[in-house]
Image: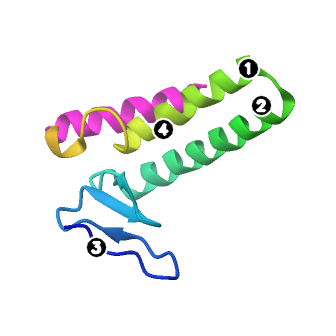
Amino acid sequence: MIGSVQADGERRTTPDGHFVVIRGRKWRATDPGVPEEPAARLRSHLMAARRAVRAALADGDPDAERAARARVHTAKVALGERGTPWWDQSDEERRRRWRDGLSALDDA
């Protein structure tokens, strides 16, 4: 059973920890195995990419939008929010996933 969301919009986690519920919608949770420093860097990349999507849409630039959306996807995969569920991966696969994603985003 999914926990309810409080009126103040607080996030709730499903009992298994695999999902969060925000405003009644279920989303895959970030992999708790990603160390805080790399997770913070990945979140920073994610937010910058989301801002780039918004700017590209405002500018009507489909190439920039496509590139920004690709960066959003890379960050979300690295955080474990997309792709193979992090709970189905070995510890080594999980480490490789966030390290590869961070490397790709740092080099972009």
| Location of residue 49 in the rendering, given as x and y in whole percent from the top left corner | 64, 38
The residue under label 4 is which amino acid type? Ala
Closer to the camera, 62 or 42?
62
Residue 26 vertical position relative to residue 13 in the rendered view, above or below? above
Majority secondary structure of magenta residues? helix
Report crowding for label 2: few under 14, some 14 to 19, many 20 or more residues within 10 A (C-alpha).
some
The quadrant the N terminus occupies is bottom left
Pointer 3 residue = 3
Left or right side of 72 for 90: left
For marks 1 and 4, give the CA distance.
20 Å
Element carrying mark 3: loop
Pointer 4 residue = 75
For marks 1 and 3, give the CA distance.
39 Å
Closer to the camera, 63 or 106?
63
Which stretch did the figure color magenta?
Answer: 90-108
The residue under label 3 is which amino acid type? Gly
Closer to the camera, 54 or 102?
54
Pointer 2 residue = 56
| Location of residue 98 in the rendering, given as x and y in whole percent from the top left corner | 36, 38
Tag 1 or tag 2, which sits nearer the N-term? 2
The residue under label 2 is which amino acid type? Ala
Left or right side of 106 for 67: right
Element carrying mark 4: helix
Pointer 1 residue = 62
